[in-house]
Amino acid sequence: MKQSSISANISQQFKRLFPSPFTIALLITFLTFGLALLLTTPKDQSISSYSYDLLISWQNGLWDKSGGGLYFAFQMMLMLVLGHTLALTRPVSRLIEYLTQYCTSTANSAAIVAFSSIFMGLFNWGLGLIFGAILARRVGEQFNRKHQVLNYGLIGACAYLGLMVWHGGISGSAPTKAMETGVIQAMTIGLTLDAPSEIPFETTIGSTMNIITSFVLLLLLPGVAYLLGKKTKLNSIPSIQPQEKHKPDVQLSPRGAEKLDRSNLFGIFIGALLCITVIMSAMNYHGSSSFGFIEPNFINLMLLGLSIFLHQSITNFLQAIQHSIGDVSGILIQFPFYFGILGIMKGSGLIVVFSDILIDLSTSTTLPLFTFLSAGVVNFFVPSGGGQWAIQGPIILQSALELNASIPKTIMAMAYGDQLTNMLQPFWALPLLGITRLKAQDILPYTFVFFLIGLIIFGSVLLIF
């Protein structure tokens, strides 16, 4: 009862402190505009005239057509939708059913769900989130059907762990965008120092630091989940009822051109063709980085090919897309405002002001640690890793260039801070909560424990390497 009361209080406090993420994006826009007026208004220009200039900078940022603007937003939307779509394929559903049969207690269920969501999250954040959510739901349904007690809130928290590792995985927004030629230079245009054209995969996601960190999280967090399952006493029979699984609409006698849409042979051929294209592009890549081909477009084409291939028909694939499309509403409406905020910061010089403050507080050695801590705070207000990279990225890049600090390590520090406080910021948990029918207060006490463990792991790694 005491733990339940604590979790309810956490949820109530969160709702009191934070409005919706879109409202937060609007408030940050006004705050940035006000700070620009206060700190950067030229002495020889009137406030009204400078306000007009800032509005133009905001509008230009809002519809930014560069690789870091609306193009980036579309990449992130595709990544989430295609990851969800892949989670709805029959092979993935069979894998979920296979794993569910080994979930016989709260402890081993928590460990299996935690390991699965983390493993999938390292490949794709959308896949990890939805795979974990569906697996958690199936576990709850199984215990309900057998009238067995289960700490369903803990299982839901374990399903969310993919969001604690995703930014260090191959779909991480900041490191994958940094690998694209010219993106770093575009983000730092107009700033004081020359930036590199790209940041190689081997120095960020593929670095020794990140590989060790990912393995530690993959092994340690399921162990902690198992112990929590052993220790917690909030066990009851889950009230979750069996959900009608996503089933493609089957028409026994398709006519005319519709036969092509419903043809398994045609769908498998198209999916296989796309997968072969992805493999060939990887084999024929000749960039400066051995794994430089692993960038958002490569990931999305891979997800597209696998999704069509595993759904078998175009009709099945499109129905799964329709089922998944609601996930992107937050990205669709919020990202342009993040780019508008960045436009104000660039146009006014606020980026330089903020980076100077970070430089004064840091050295080349401590900059990644300060970046990690600040990224964790920023994530409360900008819950999207891509949006956070758009706003905070230029500041940390400028700071790293000024201090001659490691840019790859600083980028990963921002990624770690962003993903860590997802355990306290339930914005991305909304699809999971919808699937599992849990509430935020059900999972927050346990995600808080995972947050504390992650704080120690990430902080130690950044100090050691």
Image (spheres, grey):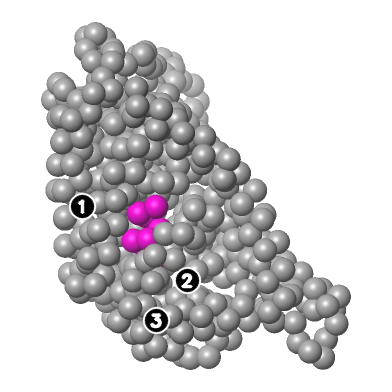
Q: Where is residue 134? Give x, y as percent.
A: 33, 29
Image coordinates for residue 234, horizontal then vertical, percent: 28, 23
Q: Nearer the viewer, residue 331 or 464?
A: 464
Helix, strand, or loop for circle 3? Answer: loop
The residue under label 1 is 217
Q: Which residue is mark 2?
A: 393
Q: Quadrant of residue 2?
A: top left
Q: Is residue 420 magenta?
A: yes
Q: Is residue 72 left or right of residue 317?
A: right
Q: Quadrant of the N terminus?
A: top left
Q: Is residue 354 left or right of residue 218?
A: right
Residue neighbourhood size for the residue with mark 1, other residues' Cα within 10 Å, grouped as few (<14), some (14–19), many (≥20): many
Q: Percent from the top left, x then y, of residue 201?
A: 28, 71
Residue tagged 3: 362
Amino acid on which disc 3 is placed? Ser
Regarding mark 1 in the picture, which secondary structure is present there?
helix
Part of the protein shown in magenta: 414-421
Amino acid carrying mark 1 in the image: Leu
